[in-house]
Image (tube, grey):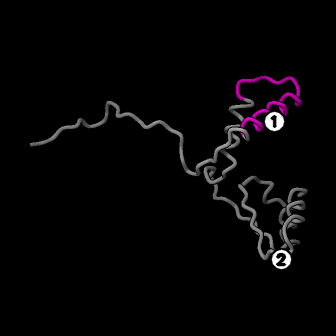
Amino acid sequence: MDFLGRVETRIKPGAERVYAVVDNLNIHGGMDVLLFALAHPREEFVFQPKYAAYLNLIEPWWKVLRSLALKGRRFDAWAEIEQAVERVIAYWNQHKHPFIWGRRHRTPRRLGVAAPPNITLI
């Protein structure tokens, strides 16, 4: 709710509609969010379809963050986690490149045993 309030203060008063695209986390449909939406009629919450995490563009960033900062490491204190995350963010900002939506970083599959042989019929 604090975040929504801060966003509301930064939006120009002349804006007719404000769309917030959110995932299906249960708190996004909670009573306090519904009351906020009623109190701010220009704001509309758009929920992404269930089982469509690929539409949520934050997911690739979480994957990068986990793999670079957290995976395979053991932390003794919360401050160490914060430092690891800050180092990854600094590194990422120095070497930034855009995510390409819908692009999967997969190696092409090689034909296996079940692939039909390349035979030309005469």
Location of residue 97 in the rendering, given as x and y in whole percent from the top left corner: 64, 44
Location of residue 78 in the rendering, given as x and y in whole percent from the top left corner: 88, 30
Asked whether 48 falls inside the magenta stretch, the response is: no
Left or right, 6 with respect to 88, comes to right
Q: Earlier in the sequence, mark 1 or mark 2?
A: 2
How packed is label 1: few (under 14 Cα within 10 Å), some, or many (20 or more)?
few
Q: Which residues are magenta?
A: 71-92
Q: Is residue 3 above or below residue 113?
A: below
Identify the secondary structure beneath mark 1: helix
Q: Quadrant of the N terminus?
A: bottom right
Location of residue 49 in the rendering, given as x and y in whole percent from the top left corner: 63, 58
Give the residue at x 63% y 50%. 53
Quadrant of residue 41 in the image? bottom right
Give the residue at x 84% y 31%. 83
Q: What's under tag 1, amino acid-wise?
A: Glu
Q: What's under tag 2, amino acid-wise?
A: Gly
Give the residue at x 87% y 56%. 3
Asked whether 84 falls inside the magenta stretch, the response is: yes
Q: Quadrant of the C terminus?
A: top left
Q: Tell me if label 1 and label 2 are in contact, CB under 8 Å.
A: no
Q: Is residue 121 above or below residue 87?
A: below
Quadrant of residue 28 in the image? bottom right
Q: Mark number for residue 68?
A: none
How packed is label 2: few (under 14 Cα within 10 Å), some, or many (20 or more)?
few
The residue labelled by disc 1 is: 86
The residue labelled by disc 2 is: 14
